[in-house]
Image: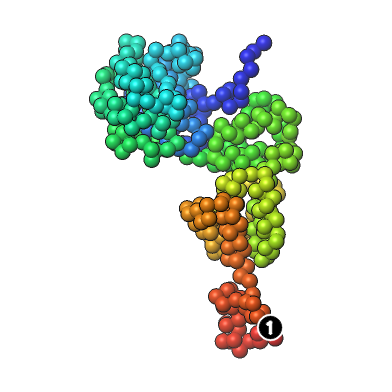
Amino acid sequence: MSEFQQWALKYRPARFGDFSGQRPSVAVLFRMAVRGQVPSALLFWGDRGCGKTSMARVLAKALNCHAGPGKAAEWPCGTCPSCEAVAAGTSPDVTEIDAASSGSVEMVRERIVGQAGYGTAGNRRVFIIDEAHGISGAGFEAMLKTLEEPASAQVVFILVTTRPDKIPQTVRDRCRAGMFRFGQLDPGVIRDRLADVCEAEGFAAEPGLLDGIAHAARGGMRDAIMRLEQVASVGITSEVMWRELTGETDFAPALLAAAADGDYPGVFAELDSALGSGDPGRVAGQLVGCLADVLVLATPGGKTAHSGQALADREALAARLGVSRASAALDVLWTLQAKVRTGDPRADLMLAAAQIARRLCPPPAPDGTIAPGSSRERISQLRKALGAPSEHT
């Protein structure tokens, strides 16, 4: 019986050609490895689950792969003794360190500075430092000289982090020739990879389910594959069943449609429902994502990775709001994310929702006249200038 392996690990990239998305970073690193011109210090930064650590391991394998440079789809080979040792975590040439759990100056001196000159003769000595921002200030100070002047030209340091701003500028300067950003993946890229996993596992999932998971993962491939395995384990194949189970409702189109109608009770009802099944940060992120989709669809030739009902809802909003009103609503949410107003995320979202509704559908003045500054007021003024009857007569 074969040993069970989680899908996120089973389908983790093992060669340069396995990476979905991240083309610029993958292409440059592949060329560097082929030419043997990898800098002694590299910094991989970006969001979680987007391929940083996987690329660090692939690069570490490639530098000592017995098969030598080859095509991106075939290299590193993964079958030579060196590649197998790296995969098993037993290679004397590759050291992986989780700085989040141990970032002290003692660890740096013992496991990095003290071992930077040791390894198999003729091989590259590689240090992969995950969550590098967890290294203490004293630890970075102890490591700086080694980064600047490695004990051997064969040594390569790969710092991996989600918080490049927490890496001291002096360390970032040493990594200047090897700084690579791994950004959030496009939902379409994630959806295609999920489809490949489904085919390999013999799991028949509806396209809408894959689309929903791809968007819910918010740019993270690892998170998306983990979500897919969870639903597969309980036999969920449809988007409807998945949303009912997880509470991942596509509430944003309905909320924005209510806002455009000036239906404040409807806006708050949709928001309450969404907040009941998700944290405020995720809810705000879904609203931003939906408005961004609407903005794209409102432009000529604009396309998104959505399909089915989700796409239809966003196309309807795009036709209704246009670029100007969608931009105005998006600006409200960007302001919310940049500046916390009340210290209460729920209250902040309620305030933002009300402001969006006011932007999309300005209310009438208390005396029943048209609100000053609104589109209706400007139209009314134009009617008067042209001598046309008022809309209230």
> Measuring 65% from the left and 25% from the top, which residue is drawn there?
200
> Measuring 65% from the left and 62% from the top, which residue is drawn there?
259
Quadrant position of residue 67: top left
Which residue, given by chain and number where applicable, does mark 1 sit on? 392
Is 332 placed above or below 95 here? below
Q: Is residue 359 left or right of residue 86?
A: right
Q: In this figure, what is the number of numbered marks? A: 1
- Element type at marker 1? loop
Q: Is residue 213 visible?
A: yes
The amino acid sitting under disc 1 is: His
Q: Position of residue 363 (x, y in %)?
A: 63, 71
Q: Quadrant of the N terminus?
A: top right
Q: How is the image coloured?
A: rainbow
> Measuring 42% from the left and 27% from the top, which residue is drawn there?
99
Crowd around label 1: few <14 · some 14–19 · many ≥20 (10 Å): few
Task: Tell which residue pokes out farthest to the bottom in this image.
Answer: 387
Is 367 placed above or below 152 here? below
152 or 307, nearer to the observer? 152
Is 112 placed above or below 252 here? above
Q: Is residue 378 left or right of residue 158?
A: right
Q: Position of residue 4 (x, y in %)?
A: 64, 17
Task: Tell which residue pokes out farthest to the front in this image.
Answer: 343
62 or 364, nearer to the observer? 364
Q: Position of residue 343 (x, y in %)?
A: 52, 52
Q: Quadrant of the C terminus?
A: bottom right
Q: Position of residue 112 (x, y in %)?
A: 34, 20
Is 164 placed above or below 301 here? above
